[in-house]
Amino acid sequence: MTTDPKTVLVLCTGNSCRSQMAEVLLNHDLAGQVHALSAGTRPQAKVADGAIAALTDIGLPTEGLYPKDVDAVLEEAIDLVVTVCDNAKESCPIFPRPVRQIHLPFHDPHGEPLESFIRVRDEIRARLVPAVAETLDLTPSAQE
């Protein structure tokens, strides 16, 4: 039995660190079960170098990542919205149709050393990936 992947939107303010790492981790760890997107309420100019380094450090692809405004994804058929910072939760847009939302805040490593990005990446993998899988009734695949 194959079902279409669930679309998960990870939302934060700048869409340059946490939400980008969560997008890549969800697409990897729940491959075939979710199609993760990320966006920001006030997107930065580019994805933080630390976020890119933290992802490539564990062999995950980062090409094509760029900060997107949440308005660009409002028309997507989204199954779940995950806010990863309090600002995004407060300014979470109203979607055209009802959508489930969960809030899992993570520390913002922007401007900090790579170790901070790696710590946040690992927290996202440990907390957000299982929370999304549980909320959408999915089975997390084994991490390599």
Image (spheres, rainbow, N blue to C red):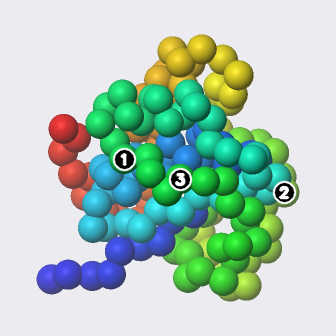
Q: Position of residue 103 (x, y in %)?
A: 64, 49
Which quarter of the figure is the N terminus placed in? bottom left
Q: What residue type is disc 3 on?
A: Leu
Task: Decide: is 51 above or below 86.
Answer: above
Judging by the rendered image, the residue that carries numbered circle 1 is 61
Label at residue 91: 2
Tell which tag, 3 or 2, sits nearer the viewer: 3
Q: Residue at x 73, y 84 (%)?
A: 96
Q: Is residue 29 left or right of residue 22?
A: left
Q: Residue at x 27, y 67 (%)?
A: 32
Based on the displayed image, in which of its 4 quarters is residue 27 positioned?
bottom left
Q: In the shown orientation, is residue 88 left or right of residue 83? A: right
Against 122, residue 29 (above or below) is below
Residue 37: percent from left, percent from top: 53, 63
Q: Amino acid at mark 1?
A: Pro
Q: 136 above or below 65?
A: below
Structural distance between the alpha carbons of marks 1 and 3: 9 Å
Number of other residues with Cα within 10 Å of mark 3, as a class: few under 14, some 14 to 19, many 20 or more = some
Q: Amino acid at mark 2?
A: Ser
Circle 1: element type: loop
Q: Which residue is identified by label 3?
A: 65
Residue located farthest toward the left when viewing the structure as drawn: 1
